[in-house]
């Protein structure tokens, strides 16, 4: 019994030393490197699923939009749950994913104001960069709601996507590469590239434009040390997209 206890203590000391050494090398990691690979694999599969369903929908063989919205909400929450579970298991801080609590109304309004400014800057950037690519009406026409129920589900999806995707891409996928490479620039670019790839179902040109706009989101997240302004901007951007597309038609 004593021998086994001594061996267990030795193993515990060794494992603690490994964890401490890893933390010293990468103090800002919020989850393990293995978990990062799992998240990337899930995102690749999800991107492939989105591309396939988009092709089917453009051909008239896709599911009803309401079902598509619900299914997308489900996958957004699944990816977020995987990220949160990995961060919790590793002992990382969820503040990197969601930011801290607002301590005052002024702090909330400041993030809201920065978020609206970010939304406008991204809208201008996308308009300029996307002037030679396919119009949004052509790339996401199959996604746009056509009745009241679909409009309500679209708003719900916009809220879920704004929170989930900012936490995953700007909170998680920006922090992990930044810590591993000790370069915030690489983290921002890696996160933007992954975000653009996730929107590949809109076509290569549009995906590149979206990736470029995502760099703005990454810069603001780094500047403010929180993804909350980006969440506001993302929700607002997605929620009013149908209205903007219809306005562009006229």
Image: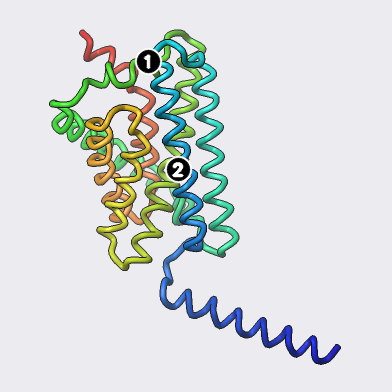
CB under 8 Å between callouts 1 and 2?
A: no
Quarter where residue 177 is shown: bottom left
Task: Identify the residue at horizontal 56%, vertical 83% (top origin).
Answer: 17
Upstream in the sequence, badge 1 or badge 2?
A: 2
Task: Identify the residue at horizontal 26%, vertical 32% (top origin).
Answer: 204
Q: Quadrant of the N terminus?
A: bottom right
Front residue of 100 and 235: 235
Q: Is residue 28 above or below residue 62?
A: below
Front residue of 143 and 48: 48
Q: Position of residue 152 (x, y in %)?
A: 49, 18
Q: Secondary structure at mark 2?
A: helix
Q: Secondary structure at mark 1?
A: helix
In the picture as drawn, the residue positioned furthest to the right comes out as: 1
**Mark 1 — residue?**
58
Q: How far is mark 1 from mark 2, CA to CA?
A: 22 Å
Quarter where residue 248 is shown: top left
* Image side of residue 119 versus residue 143, left or right: left
* Image side of residue 116 versus residue 168, left or right: left
Its colouring scheme is rainbow
Quarter where residue 71 is shown: top right
Q: Position of residue 78 (x, y in %)?
A: 56, 40
Q: Is residue 10 above or below residue 32?
A: below
Task: Identify the residue at horizontal 34%, vertical 16% (top origin).
Answer: 141
Q: Which mark is residue 43?
A: 2
Q: Quadrant of the C terminus?
A: top left
Residue 102 visible in the current orientation: no
Badge 1: how crowded within 10 Å, few (<14), some, or many (20+)?
Answer: some
Q: Which mark is residue 185?
A: none
Residue 25 visible in the current orientation: yes
Tally the numbered discs: 2
Q: Position of residue 57 (x, y in %)?
A: 42, 16
Badge 2: how crowded within 10 Å, few (<14), some, or many (20+)?
Answer: some
């Amino acid at each position: 019994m004593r021998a086994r206890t001594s061996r267990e203590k030795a193993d515990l000391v060794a494992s603690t030393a490994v964890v401490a050494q890893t933390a010293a090398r990468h103090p800002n990691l919020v989850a393990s490197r293995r978990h990062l690979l799992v998240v990337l694999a899930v995102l690749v599969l999800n991107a492939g699923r989105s591309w396939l369903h988009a092709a089917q929908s453009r051909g008239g063989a896709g599911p009803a939009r309401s079902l598509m919205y619900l299914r997308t909400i489900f996958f957004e929450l699944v990816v977020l749950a995987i990220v949160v579970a990995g961060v919790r298991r590793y002992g990382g801080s969820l503040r990197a994913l969601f930011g801290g609590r607002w301590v005052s109304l002024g702090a909330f309004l400041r993030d809201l104001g920065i978020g609206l400014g970010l939304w406008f800057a991204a809208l201008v950037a996308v308009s300029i960069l996307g002037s030679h690519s396919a119009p949004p009406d052509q790339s996401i026409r199959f996604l746009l709601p056509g009745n009241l129920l679909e409009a309500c589900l679209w708003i719900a999806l916009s809220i879920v996507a704004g929170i989930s995707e900012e936490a995953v891409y700007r909170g998680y996928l920006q922090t992990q590469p930044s810590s591993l490479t000790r370069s915030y620039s690489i983290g921002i670019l890696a996160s933007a590239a992954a975000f653009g790839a996730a929107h590949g179902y809109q076509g290569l040109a549009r995906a590149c434009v979206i990736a470029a706009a995502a760099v703005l989101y990454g810069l603001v997240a780094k500047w403010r040390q929180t993804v909350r302004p980006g969440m506001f901007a993302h929700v607002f951007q997605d929620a009013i997209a149908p209205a903007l597309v219809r306005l562009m038609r006229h």
